[in-house]
Amino acid sequence: MNAAETAAPDDSVRNAIRPALVLAWTLLGSLLAYLAIEELIRARFSPFLGFARLGNRLSVRYVFFLAAAAAVVLIRILNAAGLRRRKTAPPEAFLGRLRNVALLTLALAEAPALLGLALFLVGGYNVDFYGLLFVSLILLFMYFPRIRTWEAHVQNAPPSCPF
């Protein structure tokens, strides 16, 4: 094998991972923006009790937390199904599927923070927002696209940790 043949897989992986990396960094910035928005609202409308008057506040919180948990479960299912490689599939097709799974996973990783922000805006639950923002940060860290992991998946030698 010459140098051009060994460089080609790296370039294809780098090209495939680029949109996922852009989205991941953008989502990190949006999570920081959500935190800034929440803090500005809390400072401006102190004490902030939410924009809506809720009847049963506890059940609303449960619904939001269940939706965030569903996003986490959906991410796990999506990654388990999306990372299975068919032996007959060419590497380019697998890279496309890997990219699509990464983009969907990253989008779903933002869902808990969005739900937390909505819960804060509706009911004024800033501690719940912080918790759900932390969940999104953990998911973003766990599923952040890493070139070595993608290369290992393409070579059909996934890392020992499925995250």
Image (cartoon, rainbow, N blue to C red):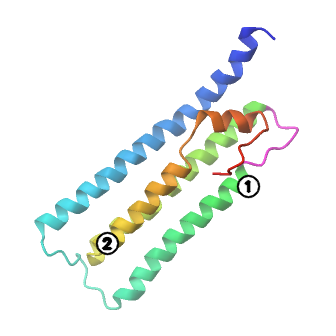
Q: Position of residue 99 (x, y in %)?
A: 62, 40
The magenta segment is 83-90
Side (left or right) of 126 relative to 139? left
- Disc assigned to residue 81: 1
Q: Residue at x 58, y 34 (%)?
A: 17
- Helix, strand or loop under label 1: helix
Instruction: Give the quarter of the image for residue 60.
Output: bottom left
Please name the predominant secondary structure of the magenta segment in the image: loop
- Residue count near mark 2 (Cα–Cα under 10 Å), binned few <14, some 14–19, many ≥20: few
- Helix, strand or loop under label 2: helix
Tell whether position 49 is magenta: no
Residue 119 appears anywhere in the view:
no
Q: Where's the N terminus, which quadrant?
A: top right
Seen as rendered, the residue at the extreme front is 160
- Residue count near mark 1 (Cα–Cα under 10 Å), binned few <14, some 14–19, many ≥20: few
Question: Which residue does the numbered mark 2 point to in the structure image?
Answer: 127
Q: Residue at x 46, y 75 (%)?
A: 65
